[in-house]
Image: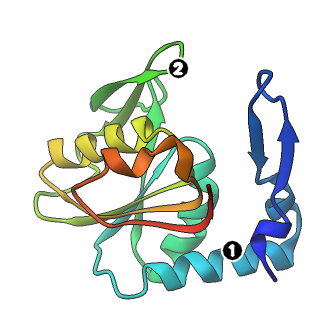
Amino acid sequence: MDIRTVIREVPDFPQPGILFRDITPVLADPAALVVALDGLSELISNITCDKLAAMESRGFLFGAPLALRLQRGLVLLRKAGKLPCPTERETYALEYGEAVLEVHRDALKPGERVILIDDLLATGGTARAAGRLVRKLGAEVAAYLFLVELKDLAGRQLLTDAPVLSLVAYD
């Protein structure tokens, strides 16, 4: 199965001129989800890591089953104010404003190797902020992993500290 055929294209969402890549059909189809998880697992099969860290919120959907497959812990990178214990935070730019990612201060140990995962790589701002959070805790980014990459938005150019891996890429 080609996951690209399952991802739905939605023109003019969230605004005119944008072609949105909707992954919900992949999540709704158990066979497609297994193919996606198998493909993502294969992409990181040769990367040594101690933990996975998933970016809110759709990164959680792929991070949890991949962490189980790898028998590694999963760290949640959340929006501001969602974590109950002391956190580190990283602010990053959005198209219209700023956003904040947070992680528990005790989520990673110095020297741990972490695979960062999200559903989609676009401009790279969220992933770059996630990488900075990992490094703030003394850990190392082993790889960035995405189900979908929008190459024309050049997000991978911001992620120079580790390999950038995507299952499906659109020009």
Quarter of the image where the N terminus is located: bottom right
Q: Residue type at mark 1: give it.
A: Ala
Is residue 23 visible from the viewing direction of this image?
A: yes
In the image, farthest residue toward the top: 97
Q: Which color scheme is applied?
A: rainbow
Q: Residue 36: where, in percent of width, then height?
A: 68, 74
In space, the residues marked 2 and 1 are separated at their CA atoms by 28 Å
Q: Residue 42: where, in percent of width, then height?
A: 52, 85
Quarter of the image where the C terminus is located: bottom right
Rendered position, 7 above or below 152: below
Q: Measuring 26% from the left and 41% from the top, which residue is drawn there?
A: 133
Q: Which residue is under mark 2?
A: 95
Q: Secondary structure at mark 1?
A: helix
Task: Work out whether residue 168 or residue 35 is closer to the camera in this orientation and state it.
Answer: 168
Q: Which residue is under mark 1?
A: 36
Q: Residue 84: where, in percent of width, then height?
A: 41, 31
The quadrant in which residue 27 appears is bottom right
Q: Measuring 48% from the left and 80% from the top, which residue is drawn there?
A: 43
Is residue 69 visible from the viewing direction of this image?
A: no
